[in-house]
Amino acid sequence: MIATVLIVEDEPAIQELIAYNVQHAGYECIGVDNAEMALAVIKDALPDLIILDWMLPQMSGIEFARILRSNERTRRIPIIMLTARTEEEDKVTALEIGADDYITKPFSPRELIARIQAVLRCLPSAACDEIIEIDGLRLNPADHRVTCSGAVIELGPTEYRLLHFLMTHPERVYSRDQLLHQVWGDQVSAEGRTVDVHIRRLRKALESVSKDECIQTVRGTGYRFSATALTIVKDSDADI
């Protein structure tokens, strides 16, 4: 899968420079100017990594990073903080609020790409025998049992594999072709229509525990598993 990098940078020249090098390195990228625009992107689908400028209009990158880290849906997205600040105290602040790395302006594009690659290499892969639980929906790979509030959900083997993949990659949008590759593997006779049929069966099964809406259709793109929503609030406001 090609990783998607979200660039949150309000200086057009710098955003363009980063985007060019990120794409040249083989990643997909999305560029936005502020935290509010970044939120709109994140609501649609989670990026694999965020390059976040410290000094942004309206809401600073530090404040936005703190919000992302306080929310269950977004807390695991890797963040590389980008800033002109060079003091050790500033670097410590960025790392303490949850940034995975820190790079100062001016920067070498080669160094930035190397840091992106290093951070992405450190991402944990979902263990095949690890119990997954999201918003009350629990999947246990050890016995292929899916439950919700104690109720057992009966799934066929393909629906189970489909749910397992989507739950281990929550909030990511996958096209039918991507799901075919990930779930059906080398069954070359399968086609996009096959995905639609099994998605319907999966939703029907989850309907018994009111979790069918977790399987969302993204028009013109594909499907994703989503259980929660993200809203920007200030630190003084209620938790999200």
Image (cartoon, rainbow, N blue to C red):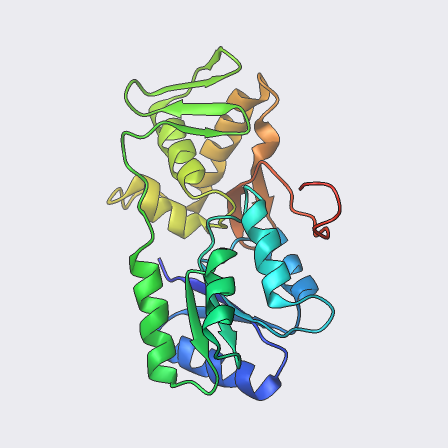
215 vs 56, left or right, is: left
Foreground of the two, 162 or 91: 91
The image quarter in which residue 138 lies: top left
Number of marks: 0
Query: Where residue 229 appears, x then y in whole percent?
Result: 64, 42
| Quadrant of the image occupied by residue 120 | bottom left
Q: As displayed, is residue 6 above or below residue 146?
A: below
Is residue 90 shown to the viewer in this render? yes
Q: Which quadrant is the N terminus positioned in?
A: bottom left
Question: Residue 25 at what x, y percent from top left?
Answer: 35, 76
Would residue 139 be found to the left or right of residue 215 on screen? left
User: In front: 29, or 99?
Assistant: 99
The answer to whether any part of residue 29 appears in the image is no
Residue 118, horizontal then vertical, whole percent: 30, 65
Vertical relation: 116 (above or below) 20? above
Q: Is residue 9 above or below residue 4?
A: below
Q: In front: 205, or 198? A: 205
Q: 140 or 194, which is in the foreground?
A: 140
Residue at horizontal 51 percent and vertical 21 percent from the top: 205
Provide residue 104's location: percent of width, then percent of height. 46, 79
- Quarter containing the C terminus: top right
User: Measuring 43% from the left and 75% from the top, which residue is drawn there?
Assistant: 103
Q: Residue at x 66, y 64 (%)?
A: 35
